[in-house]
Image (spheres, grey):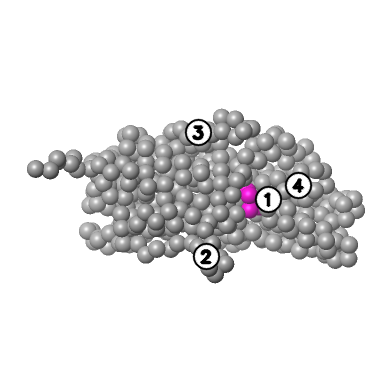
Amino acid sequence: MPRSIRPAPGNLLYAQSGGPTAVINATAAAVIQAARRARGKIGKVYAARNGILGALREDLVDTGALSDAEVRAIGHTPGAAFGSCRFKLKGIEDSRAQYERLVAVFRAHDIRWFLYNGGNDSADTSNKISRISAELGFPIHCIGVPKTVDNDLVVTDTCPGFGSVAKFTAVSMREAALDVRSMAESSTKVFVMEVMGRHAGWIAAAAGLAGRKPDEAPHLILFPEIPFDEARFLAAVKATVERVGWCAVAVSEGLKTADGRFLAEAGGKDAFGHVQLGGVGPQIAQLVTARLGYKNHWSVADYLQRSARHVASKTDAEQAAAVGKAAVEYAVAGMNAVMPVIRRRANAPYRWTIEPAALADIANHEKKMPADFIREDGYGITPAARRYLAPLIQGEAFPPWGPDGLPAYATPRFKAVRKRLPGYAIADR
Ligand code: F6P
């Protein structure tokens, strides 16, 4: 008789949430690979389509149908391979039906672990599911897996996804600056590049890595942490053009007026209640031309910056994979309501480790740029910021390139898991 194999004590569900990063799928691949290695301890590894929405709709895929090569290829592909969402679960008092539905889905598919890959809103969702599923009699072990280009999660030293957007931003600023410099004598004098980051200026700060010496681009960085002072800014642009011949500006989408309003609200709000940002770059550029008469060019990096896998940071890709692997290890070890976070052990050479932190300490908090990372005049980064940022963009993790001269990205067809429950319409969106 064959040796009896103890049945795995349940299945694992992985889902992605919020804005994708260049390396979120490195985390996804690492989760799948680590769970495969934990065979016998974890049963099937499911992924929900479009984050928690797929869990509510019972729209699950079986990652077991993917070959090892397909998993590896997903790992170097940008976007969120399984689809993402912006959807916030409220408390049990407002959304009892949604929690009951989630528990019904988890129960129907024997899901015992939920790994939610996202930012601080997703940490909040994982934390709530962990607590409320226990209250509803089907306790789920929830692990939040960090990800956000905004780099605004507390406790962790950095957020997977940030190192790559930082590298893209610094590379783009260095390259575009050479272009402006060559045109400045008779044409363009000012270049403005808008980057993401919402309320936190980490991505804008990363543009500062492009220049090493005084008067190298970017000459001015506009942080969301520093209220915009129009007259002072215009004077700084004029002084830079007169001194250097041209001026490169990096501006964060979250730049605010002195009374706390965003300069550029694009209009809508998402399901988390976040205002959609975008457009401050052209606004600033037009202001410069209208008031100082300089010809400008501007760019809004927008989705290009968070999908730029071709110029991803190797350090970032490694950290993204490491948190995925650790999340599975924590799940197997019986941990609950925690997140694997990155702890910096040394700056030079950069050394880091992964350790668990309580989701309750991370959910709904936001880490902004500390004051000692912003230059005294408010328009640049300090040596301390440079020491923090520089290791995060180290190394290149190029994807393979195809015969068409483009990165060979993978969007495999997923095998749907057969539904066992009646359909469910998601109200309250
Ligand atoms: O949360 C990350 C982020 O990239 C922010 O920097 C940006 O403001 C936002 O997402 C844009 O989100 P969406 O794609 O939902 O409009």
Q: Residues within 10 Å of mark 3 (few under 14, many from 20)?
A: few
User: Secondary structure beneath disc 1?
Assistant: helix
* Type of secondary structure dominating the magenta stretch: helix
SS for callout 4: loop
Callout 2–callout 3 Cβ contact below 8 Å:
no
Q: Earlier in the sequence, mark 2 or mark 3?
A: 3
Q: Nearer the viewer, mark 2 or mark 3?
A: 2
| Label pair 1/3, CB-CB below 8 angstroms | no
Q: Position of residue 60 (x, y in %)?
A: 32, 57
Discs 1, 2 touching: Cβ within 8 Å: no
Asked if the residue under mark 1 is in contact with the one under mark 4, i.e. CB atoms within 8 Å, the reply is no
Q: Which residue is under mark 1? A: 170
- State left or right for residue 137 relative to residue 386: left
Answer whether residue 167 is magenta in the image: yes
- Work out whether residue 136 or residue 173 is closer to the camera in this orientation and state it: 173
CA gap, disc 4 and disc 3: 29 Å
Ligand 1 closer than 8 Å to label 2 CB: no
The alpha-carbon separation of the residues under discs 1 and 2 comes to: 26 Å
- The residues colored magenta run 166-170
Q: Toward the viewer: 283 or 33?
A: 33
Label 1 – label 3 distance at C-alpha: 25 Å
Q: Which residue is mark 3?
A: 353
User: Which of disc 4 and disc 2 is earlier in sequence?
Assistant: 4
Give the CA separation, mark 4 to mark 1: 8 Å
Q: Earlier in the sequence, mark 4 or mark 3?
A: 4
The amino acid on which the numbered mark 3 sits, given as a three-letter code, is Thr
Residue at 80% x, 43% y: name it.
213
